[in-house]
Image (tube, grey):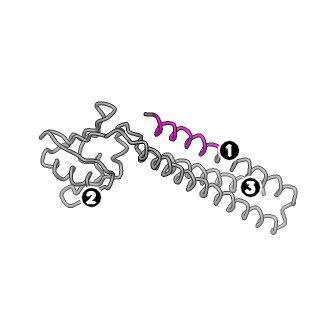
Amino acid sequence: MNEELELIFAETEESMNNAISHLEKELVKIRAGRANPAMLSPVKVDYYGSITPLSGVGNVGTPDARTITVQPWEKSMIPEIEKAILNAGLGLNPSNNGEMVIINIPPLTEDRRRDLVKAAKAEAEHARVSIRAARKDANDALKKLKDDGAPEDLIKGNEEEIQKLTNNFNSKVDSILERKEADIMTV
């Protein structure tokens, strides 16, 4: 019985941690007006017929807060890298100096900042939905144990623990969102 309960808790916590990890990855993609190499993580380049992540064809760096550079390992890849960045739908305009691809990050307008905050809130809500789904799965597993003859007070106590875990992860989502909102709205 205790092993089954421990397994339920472990799986629930892992699912909730995955929701937090996913949220953090998605929020990195929402740019706050500052250059960040992770902004280019969705970019895939056609590298001699195989689709390769941008980091697989060159070094991505940020020499300053408003610039991202991509130093390709082969100069012949510069046009392919520029095309991949344009096609990724990130709203970035790459240029090159013959040696590397340079992307200037424009300052954000107030309207664009509000749109980015909305996008961040939507990602946070997706994380909350995932956390609630993990809670529901755990509670369903506890009900199954109850149906299999587990004492009701044991099940009730564990349901309360699952709810505490859920509340804890929801407050993590709130604090991550708060930090991202502050980051986006800082001019």
Residue 134 highlighted magenta (yes or no): no
> On the image, numbered disc 3 is attached to which residue?
5
Residue 185 highlighted magenta (yes or no): yes
Q: Are marks 3 and 1 in contact (CB under 8 Å)?
A: no
Residue 183, placed above or below residue 141: above
Q: CA distance from mark 1 to mark 2?
A: 40 Å
From the top left corner, tell me how far across and down residue 127 is, in percent.
57, 53
Residue 148, placed above or below residue 118: below
Q: Residues within 10 Å of mark 2 (few under 14, many from 20)?
A: few
The reply, left or right, for residue 31 in relation to residue 148 is: left
Q: Are marks 2 and 3 in contact (CB under 8 Å)?
A: no
Residue 132 occupies quadrant: bottom right
> On the image, numbered disc 1 is attached to which residue?
168
In depth, the one of 84 and 54 nearer the eye is 84
Q: SS at mark 2?
A: strand
Residue 185, placed above or below residue 52: above
> On the image, numbered disc 2 is attached to which residue?
51
In depth, the one of 17 and 33 nearer the eye is 33
| Residue at image location 61% in from the left, 51% down from the top | 16
Q: What amino acid is found at the position of numbered circle 2 in the picture?
A: Ile
Q: What amino acid is found at the position of numbered circle 1 in the picture?
A: Asn
| Residue at image location 74% in from the left, 55% down from the top | 5
